[in-house]
Amino acid sequence: MRKEVIRHMRPVRIFVRSIRDAFKSVLRNFSLSIASILCTTITLILVSVAIISAANIENATKLIEDELSIVVYLDKSVTEEQIENIESDIMSQENVSEYTFKSKTEWKEEMSEYDDAFETVLNYLDENPLMDSLIVKVKDVNDLSETAKIISEISGVDTVKYGDGMVDSIISAFDVMEKVVVVVVIALVLVTAFLISNTIKLTIFSRRSAIEIMRLVGASNITIKLPFIFEGFIIGVIGAIIPICVSIYGYVILYDILNGHIFSNMLVLIKPFNFVFYVSAVLLVLGAIVGMLGSLKAVGKYLKI
Amino acid sequence: MKFIELKNVSKVYRNGVTALANVSVEIDKGEFVFVIGLTASGKSTFIKTLYREEKPSSGTVMVGGLNVGKIRNRRVYKLRRKIGIVFQDFKLLPKLTVYENVAFALECVGMKEKEIRPMVMSALERVGLKHKVRAFPGELSGGEQQRVCIARAIVNKPKLLICDEPTGNLDPETSKEIMKVIENINKDLGTTIIMATHDKDIVNRMKKRVLLIEHGLLVGDYAKGSYKTHEAS
């Protein structure tokens, strides 16, 4: 029974010792640790900038896309029944997410509120010259014009209006930007992983004799790897502290200075809270994982004898 | 079955150099054996096949019932825990104290701190370095560093102690002291000792069994005390 307990305690002890040794080693190899930490810090700051940009572009694109809709004007002669048919025809389109009916009376009220001149002219006429309409939202904005074309061919539809050329170009511009930023983020993460792994490799290279000795005195591979993995973890986490502070304070200050939007009200920035905390969490996890993987990769090289 | 058995062991390195050729030898438990030969004669390779730093190209190496050549890379540690190894260049961790260097071998196995302490202290006492537990290797003389290395090798009470030119870097006086320590380990603990050396004085003086290796061949296996006679004749 007691032997059982002891056998189960051993992995725990090795685990705890590995953590202790990792801390010791970070301190005893101070200059190399600092180099690794700084390397992590710099690359994580770049990653942070990229993530914040990507998230904001994504957000702006989404906001603009949400605003986009197709306005379907109906023939004046359509009956209630026909309207229902048109509605079901529109809903049967795969790309259509929802629609709302806006009657000519509603249009009249809205326009009258907007401008007194409209009100005067509209009231002067006996009959409301405006048309009933359906405002259609789509799922994928990229197919907006195609969907609009299909809807325009439904009988009882007079005209279809959407942003036309301007909208198309905005959407494609944002699309390209989004893709570019995603590529940049991925590239930066890979570069970070590579840099950290290389710096840690340097740290480990200086200790390959230690690894050799560990093997000679009968340390199992996992016992040798564990302290290095924890060391990578510690370096990654410490390296993430400054980028996290920079991200939180930097973004809050930027948001305040820009009053929450860039250029126009169209490009709205994401509210700092809790956004900055999500970014911080991503940086922390990224630092820790990349640090551990970097160590693992670097130490593995010296275990193949 | 003998404690150590080599059967037709050959080792050819990738560059085509034959370091060992058809070596067969048996060693009993508790024996003290010198392995001698010129530089590049193959004696280091012979020693290294015993602790699976080198795999034999052909033949079998049995140590304490284990087929050493067949052990997988990630299982090598199981063999290493059963043997102690002493090196010419000490191989101490410079950033660990004397105590930590010796305790290291036990920590790797996952022993309790409570169990480790007395074992480390008794190993250090045996090599006469109990008073230097807190020193770092850099603060010790060569002889003292070798004692730490020996303490580390014997701390988990191995059945086999392998010494690869332990006195190669030491002056004759210090070498004598180190040999005394190793001899006592053999006598008191019954540890089997296999020691590669090219120090003729030591071999002649100690009168132990001698294996002579030349060009990868085992050219002589001299029983206790007969080697010097051979040289004289």
Image (spheres, coloured by chain):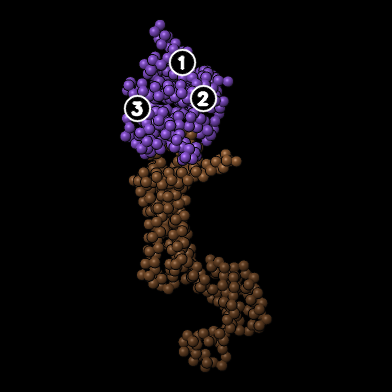
Chain colours: A brown, B purple
Residue ID for mark 3: B143
The nearer-to-camera label among 3 and 2 is 3
The nearer-to-camera label among 2 and 1 is 1
Instruction: Work out how far the residue at label 1 is from the one at label 3, CA to CA, in angstroms.
Output: 25 Å
Q: Secondary structure at mark 2?
A: loop
How packed is label 3: few (under 14 Cα within 10 Å), some, or many (20 or more)? Answer: many
Horizontal arrangement in the rendering, residue B199 relative to residue B69 (left or right): left
Q: Looking at the picture, tell me which residue is in the foreground, B155 or A87.
A: B155
Mark 2 vs 1, N-terminal side: 2
Q: Which mark is residue B209?
A: 1
Q: Please report the residue visible at 38 percent of the width from the left and 60 percent of the height from the top.
A: A245
Q: Secondary structure at mark 3?
A: helix
Residue type at tag 3: Gly
Q: Does residue A175 lie above or below A26 as drawn? A: below
Would you say residue B222 is visible in this rendering? Answer: yes
Asked where in the image residue A98 lies, by quadrant, the reply is bottom right
Q: Which mark is residue B56?
A: 2
Q: Secondary structure at mark 1?
A: strand
